[in-house]
Image (spheres, grey):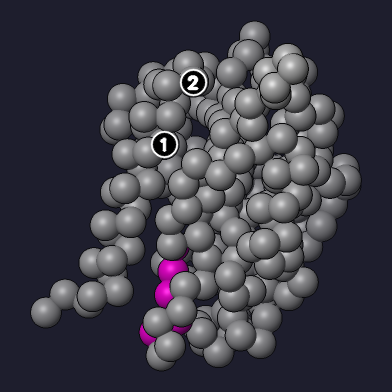
Amino acid sequence: MDDPLVQQRQLVEQARDAHVRWLTDAVDVDLVLDVGANRGQFGRGLREGGYAGRLVSFEPAAGPRARLEELAAADPGWEVRPWALGESEGEAVLHAVDEETELGSLRPSSEFGRAWKDVMSRTREERVVVRRLDAAWDELAGGATRVLLKLDTQGFDLAAFRGAGRLVRAGGPVVALLSEVANLAIYDDVPPMAEHLAEYADAGWSLAGLYPVSFERASLRVIEHDAVLVRTPEPSPGG
């Protein structure tokens, strides 16, 4: 018999992906920035869903990036950058998990994370380059004016968002945002979901959809959500 939690996740992913496909059309996205691309699952889903515009994927971990580069090599509109994105330029230690998903985070796993998945206590370290998105924008833009920014950085989304600076503020080119937010932190010092969403709201973003990503099997609590956000409309004059 199929695992009910696996079935639930598949259904949620289908709903989220359908929402993202609709959103890229609705706001005329001409560039997708896929931050935390892993092996290219998100980019492949976009292509299968009909998105034909430019796609730039960021993956600092060497293992999954090798598979990502193989996937992107056959697609002239798909570029790969070997960076993590954050609030400051420089280098950092990536805590990479040696398992099929090859996840990695700039934060060490939390006590809860190690209890949730034993493999998270067995990591190796890689030194990686960290860039601010706004500092790298000129070499990425290629004339794009309407950008979907997808963040899946295993606990580093707010830092990557802050490093986008003016790009994610009113008048900037980012017009849609997809971010993973934590209800239960599997990495140390991850801001809770409420703090994530509050900071996005303060920067002019409104929630358009919330999709549970993973669950704690024992309690059935949701661990993380994918949050879809759009620009908060400017107040009408005199309104």
**Quadrant, the C terminus:** top right
Residue of label 2? 27
> In x, y percent, where is residue 89?
87, 43
- Residues at marks 2 and 1 touching, judged by CB atoms closer than 8 Å: no
Q: Which residues are magenta?
A: 213-217
Compared to 187, does 129 lie above or below?
Answer: above
- Image quadrant in which you'd find residue 144: top right
> In x, y percent, where is residue 157?
68, 52
Q: Is residue 194 visible?
A: yes
Viewed as shown, does residue 239 lie left or right of 27? right
Residue of label 1? 20
Compared to 82, does 126 lie above or below?
Answer: below
Give the residue drawn at x 33%, y 63%: 9
Which kind of residue does numbered mark 2 sit on? Val
* Callout 2 crowding tier (Cα within 10 Å): few <14, some 14–19, many ≥20: some
Give the residue drawn at x 71%, y 35%: 204
Compared to 105, does 159 lie above or below?
Answer: above
Q: Secondary structure at mark 2?
A: loop
Q: Secondary structure at mark 1?
A: helix
